[in-house]
Image (cartoon, rainbow, N blue to C red):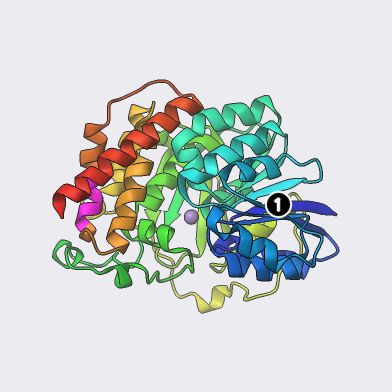
């Protein structure tokens, strides 16, 4: 029996993880569920999976949560600190980190120090603090297993390879909903258009990140830290069919890939059951139905956010942290109709120039950079209104 804490259980990854767990009630026990704000969904999940504890990050919703679960022996907590405390519990084997954005960093560090197995869906953690997180994970021998579909594919391709060196990572990208749009069309896209992803069903923030391809930029940074390769060894391929979930090329020229239908439940389940593979319901890949698989270079002019991510990785220090927070602010501002699609990029670029460079890679330094970036980014939007 594996005992699991799901941080961010009401989001897209969290709910799909609970579907996986529900298919194998004999193998998994849900110990902790947490939500940022969706208290009703959390109540429903808690009544269904009967965890030991629940946390609502928004403290205003605490009383609602407590009262709704008063008849059950479930511990109820609220606030950001509680997220860090619950992952330390001795009764947890695996922490599925499915929070959105910078908020995932601090609980991840706590889970690592408590030597939990981390199933990591929160890529921003590695974008902001990849060096710190991976170094700490080695120190505490806390394995980090990727949940992101591309990184899971890379991880699956590396099973059995031992110390064999990676020559190149082939990181695939769907290209998002605007792959075939002209630069002129891109100027007029709406949040509703950007929120309609052709292949993957995901949360709002990551869907916008896919439309700008910042998501792929983040995944380059994520891959750099997870697999210990140079940025130069990571090649992005636009592959609109989303069948090849990513691949690894080795020194002898062999390329290993993982293929499948786009279904996040597979990488979620694999992270929870590695090295075992369990049955999973759902559609199967039918190669006879695939007429062609295509691969092309990303258009860095139409999707300059990808270049910004490579640049942040090259600069190092706090640059990826600035990139991440500037993107969080601009992504939300676009969804709220405050800025145009193209300004997501232009504003992030401006913010990256405005926040001073800092080499130090400590948690406190990242917190300071994150807060400063938030202020600078918000001021920039206010000026533009
Ligand atoms: Mn992905």
Image location (x, y in percent) of residue 376: 26, 39
Q: Residue at x 41, y 35 (%)?
A: 231
Image location (x, y in percent) of residue 17: 65, 62
Q: Which residue is mark 1?
A: 5
Q: Is residue 213 left or right of residue 118?
A: left
Boundaries of the magenta span: 342-347
Indicate the secondary structure of the residue bearing disc 1: strand
Image location (x, y in percent) of residue 279: 75, 67
Which residue is at the far bottom? 289
Q: Residue at x 86, y 64 (%)?
A: 26
The answer to whether the beta carbon of the residue marked 1 is less than 8 Å from any atom of ligand 1 is no
Image quadrant assignment for residue 323: top left
**Structural crowding at the residue carrying mark 1, measured as other residues with C-alpha within 10 Å and reported as few (<14), some (14–19) or many (≥20):** many
Residue 310 vertical position relative to residue 347 in the rendered view, above or below: above
Q: Residue at x 82, y 60 (%)?
A: 73
Asked if residue 17 can be seen in this view, the reply is no
Residue 187 vertical position relative to residue 103 in the rendered view, above or below: below
Q: Is residue 345 magenta?
A: yes
Q: Quadrant of the N terminus?
A: bottom right
Image location (x, y in percent) of residue 148: 54, 53
Q: Is residue 84 magenta?
A: no
Residue 203 vertical position relative to residue 152 in the rendered view, above or below: below
Q: Is residue 160 left or right of residue 189?
A: right
Q: Is residue 342 left or right of residue 245?
A: left
Q: Is residue 179 left or right of residue 170?
A: left
- Residues 12 and 284: in front is 12
């Amino acid at each position: 029996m594996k005992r699991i804490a799901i941080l961010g259980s009401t989001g897209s990854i969290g709910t799909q993880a609970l579907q996986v767990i529900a298919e194998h009630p004999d193998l998994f026990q849900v110990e902790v569920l947490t939500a940022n704000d969706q208290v009703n969904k959390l109540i429903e999940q808690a009544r269904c999976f009967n965890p030991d504890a629940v946390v609502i990050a928004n403290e205003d919703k605490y009383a609602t949560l407590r009262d709704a679960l008063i008849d059950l022996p479930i511990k109820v907590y609220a606030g950001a600190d509680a997220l860090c405390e619950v992952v330390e519990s001795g009764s947890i084997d695996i922490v599925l980190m499915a929070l959105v954005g910078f908020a995932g960093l601090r609980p991840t560090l706590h889970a690592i120090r408590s030597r939990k197995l981390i199933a990591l869906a929160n890529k921003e953690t590695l974008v902001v603090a990849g060096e710190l997180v991976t170094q700490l994970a080695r120190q505490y021998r806390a394995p980090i297993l990727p949940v992101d579909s591309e990184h899971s594919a890379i991880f699956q391709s590396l099973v059995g390879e031992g110390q064999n060196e990676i020559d190149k990572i082939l990181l695939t990208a769907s290209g998002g909903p605007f792959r075939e749009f002209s630069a002129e069309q891109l100027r007029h896209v709406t949040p509703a258009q950007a929120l309609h992803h052709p292949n993957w069903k995901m949360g709002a923030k990551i869907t916008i990140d896919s439309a700008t391809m910042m998501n792929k930029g983040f995944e380059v940074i994520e891959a750099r830290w997870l697999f210990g390769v140079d940025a130069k060894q990571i090649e992005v391929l636009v592959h609109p069919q989303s069948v090849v979930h990513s691949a690894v090329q080795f020194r002898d020229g062999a390329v290993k890939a993982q293929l499948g239908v786009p279904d996040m439940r597979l990488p979620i389940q694999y992270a929870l059951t590695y090295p075992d593979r369990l049955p999973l319901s759902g559609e199967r890949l039918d190669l006879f139905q695939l007429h062609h698989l295509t691969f092309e270079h990303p258009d860095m002019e139409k999707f300059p956010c990808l270049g910004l991510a490579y640049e942040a990785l090259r600069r190092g220090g706090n640059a990826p942290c600035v990139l991440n927070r500037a993107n969080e602010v601009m992504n939300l501002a676009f969804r709220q109709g405050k800025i145009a699609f193209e300004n997501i990029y232009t504003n992030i670029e401006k913010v990256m120039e405005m926040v001073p460079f800092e080499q130090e890679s400590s948690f406190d330094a990242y917190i300071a950079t994150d807060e400063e970036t938030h202020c600078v980014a918000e001021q920039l939007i206010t000026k533009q209104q």
